[in-house]
Image: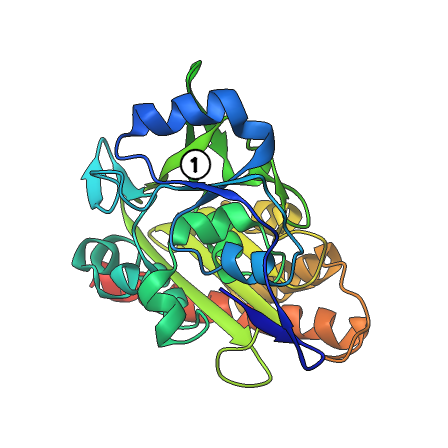
Amino acid sequence: MWGFLGGQAMFPAAFDYLAPTTLGEALDILAERGDDAKVMAGGQSLIPLLKLRFAQPALVLDIGRLPKLNVVSRHDGRLIIGALVRHVDVERDRTLADNAPIMAEAAHWIADPLVRNRGTLVGSVCHADPAGDWGAVMLALNAELVAKSKAGERVIAAAEFFKDPFTTALKPNEIVTEIRIPIPPGQAGGAYNKLERKVGDFATVAVAVQVEMNGRKVTRAGIGLTSVGPTNIKATEAEKALAGQELTDETIREAARLAASAADPKDDIRGSAAYKKDVVRVFVQRGLHTALGRAQEKRT
């Protein structure tokens, strides 16, 4: 396992490696060594950090052999996505396509086929890269993360999960075993729009939008933003402005303005902060129009 930086070969620092075969065994290990450990599922986020020594854990805990965590299912009005479900599984799963089609749309934007074939949705969310795609989608869908430890289980709302760049509410002794997404009771639609410099690149800006409708009015709106702040951002004020309203050109423009105001991007090689805010505005408008059309298609 090695890489190159500035023409020089880079090797990870030495670490212990354990691959438990049961969840109980994994939680026992984390109870003892959680402060020194990094959990690995598909490895597409962690391995590059190890190669460049941006992460130097004493232990890599590989959960890739744990049973029953690579399943997508429905239960009690929710979609359940196990910790080992890969991006490519999301892209192809009919249950998700029927109940949360925005997820299949977003999965297609993840990196490249090599990464999608190995990387996991839950691992990507827990990596908490502010330029990552899944965080914004989870915020738009009001997802919940189920974290387990020896002490028991707790459920963390996606809106409370992302704390800082690459930092989450997860404790060192916890493993996220699944993500739960509420299934809309009626008509709903969503869209994921991403601006990238080349195929497979991190987002310059990306926006996830989800609306639930009762007739012509919005009962709930979700808007998640990528690459325009230190974490993925939930555009709460824009969501509130849409609740109970019809998706007219005027209400859509106002929601887009509020979402752009929630963004906090920085000038960099991908563009100026002002440019990125305007892309947020345009993408929210575009996403809401698309989401409305998809919700209306479901009604018919």
The single residue placed furthest to the front in the displayed view is: 14
Classify residue 241 as left or right of residue 94.
Answer: right
The amino acid type, in three-letter code, at marker 1 is Glu
- Can residue 221 be seen here? The reply is no
Residue 36: percent from the left, percent from the top?
A: 59, 33
How dense is the environment of label 1, judged by Cα within 10 Å: few (below 14), some, or many (20 and up)?
A: many
At mark 1, the secondary structure is: strand
Image height check: is 172 above or below 180? above
- Please report the residue visible at 34 percent of the width from the left and 62 percent of the height from the top: 118
- Please report the residue visible at 75 percent of the width from the left and 79 percent of the height from the top: 271
- Position of the C terminus, as image quadrant, is bottom left
Classify residue 286 as left or right of residue 153.
Answer: right
Classify residue 90 as left or right of residue 41.
Answer: left
Q: Nearer the viewer, residue 98 or 253?
A: 98
* Residue picked out by circle 1: 144
Residue 76: percent from the left, percent from the top?
A: 22, 30
Colouring used for the render: rainbow
Image height check: is 156 above or below 162? above
Q: Nearer the viewer, residue 245 or 221?
A: 221
Image height check: is 122 above or below 12? above
Quadrant of the rendered image containing residue 182: top left
The single residue placed furthest to the bottom in the displayed view is: 198
Residue 193: percent from the left, percent from the top?
A: 50, 72
Q: How many marks?
A: 1
Residue 13: percent from the left, percent from the top?
A: 61, 52
- Please report the residue visible at 27 percent of the width from the left and 43 percent of the height from the top: 65
- Can residue 122 be seen here? The reply is yes
Q: Nearer the viewer, residue 261 or 270?
A: 270
Image height check: is 204 above or below 177? below
